[in-house]
Amino acid sequence: MDLKAGLWQKQTLKLTMTQELSQAIALLQYSFQELAAFLENKAVENPLLQVDYKNVRTMDPRLDRIRHTRKHDGQESNRWIEQIGEKTDSLEDYLLSQLNLLTVSARQKQIIIKLIECIDENGYLCAACQDISAKHQVSESETETALAILQSLEPAGIAARSLAECLLLQLERKQPSNELAKQMLSEHFVLFAEKKWKSLAKIMNTSLQEIQKVYDEIQTLDPRPGSAFQIERPAYIVPDIIVSRNGDELSVSVFDDTVPRITFNEAYYQLLSEYKDDAVKRFLHEKQQDYQWIMKSLEQRKETLMKVALKILEKQREFFLTGPDHLKPMTMREVAEELDVHESTVSRAVREKYIQTQAGTYELKSFFTSSVQTVEHNQASSHQVKVAIGKFIKEEDKQKPLSDQEIVHLLKEHEGTVVSRRTVAKYREQLGIPSSTKRKRFE
């Protein structure tokens, strides 16, 4: 091993990502919300960059309704019902209102209130009675008594400590005489839930038909009794691409009206240009260059989106003219090669982007599906195979449900697609469909 010191000349090739290139890549993958936030932050850092929101309208329908009402003041009396505020009670408020009507001691009431504070959004008690007792310095028997009172309130199944207890509480109110069902939930819940009914039938000395009746009854119960009180604000999807149709003619456009416009602050630039200080000149030059790079990156983002959208329109023409059932197999690599860009560029371009069509609004990435071989040596999309699998299972005999291998034969015979049993199982799981043993009915 030579450890002598010396000087050597070595030639290497290295790719250096500049800050501007990194910024252009980031802008491409931003959704319109992320892009708007980015421009706002840049406006804070760069005084030469102005953000204009005049082109952006709110997507809140309540504000739109207010505007509409103001325009038609004469019709305001006819729209009184739209002006009534929505009153929503939380689960805690609902339970407390019932508690105030009960005849309980002040001590019991305080313990119940502490228990209500430990109920999660689904209506389950998320703390052990032992821990609650220790924290608030009350006996466990008092806590258990208070919990029993709380569990007697509406909605049924509230403050349960497990799924089995939640269902059991509801069943005791709905069918108090169904001892078989109560025994299954309290003593053999795992076997019952996992549909190991043959073993369960032997243990309980009952028939599979009786277990099936219990299962159907349990299906009518609510496993999340507190979820009805959770108010979620609707999430509005704003499309990035819009496809319009005129007969058999299709056109595509980039919808960027939701992105705030940026302009150059010429007045501020002229004001600072009068200073002869070198530091001020460097500052102006850097910020001016930063503004130009952002404008260039935004234009490049729009251009890339348009190229990808046009390619999707070209390759998925039947989808836009006929419907989702005619989605053809298409990969990002295939599109990238035809556009002469890197596959990661296409991946970033379709990330969290949406396209609006006459058939609805879809994620751009949903158009990229793997291909499946057909008996005629053509290609079918995985989406078409999933639709066929769902159709076969929907029409199957529930007492003799189709196995994955039988679905393989049906796909080959009726749809002309050649897939493996493992592929069918994967697609079935993606559709949220259980296996044949769990789909089987016994009556």
Image (cartoon, rainbow, N blue to C red):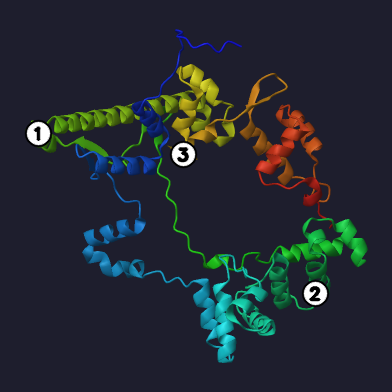
Q: Measuring from the top left, give residue 440's x and y in whole percent.
A: 81, 51
Q: Is residue 66 above or below residue 100?
A: above
Q: Secondary structure at mark 1?
A: helix
Q: As rendered, which of 238 and 328 lies closer to the eye?
A: 238
Q: Secondary structure at mark 2?
A: loop
Locate the C terminus by quadrant: bottom right
* Residue in the picture at 46% in, 31% down: 348
Q: Identity of the amino acid at label 3?
A: Glu
How many marks the image carries: the answer is 3
The residue beneath circle 3 is: 352
As measured in the structure, the alpha-carbon distance from the residue carrying label 2 to the one carrying label 1 is: 85 Å
The image quadrant of residue 173 is bottom right
Q: Is residue 127 among what the camera can see?
A: yes
* Residue in the picture at 22% in, 33% down: 287
* Residue in the picture at 71% in, 75% down: 174
Q: Measuring from the top left, give residue 133's x and y in whole percent.
A: 63, 79
Q: Is residue 206 among what the camera can see?
A: no
Residue that lies at the very extreme toward the front in this rendered image: 4
The residue beneath circle 2 is: 178
Q: Measuring from the top left, give residue 66's x and y in whole percent.
A: 28, 61
The residue beneath circle 1 is: 270
Q: As rendered, which of 130 and 182 lies closer to the eye?
A: 130
Whether label 2 touches label 1, CB < 8 Å? no
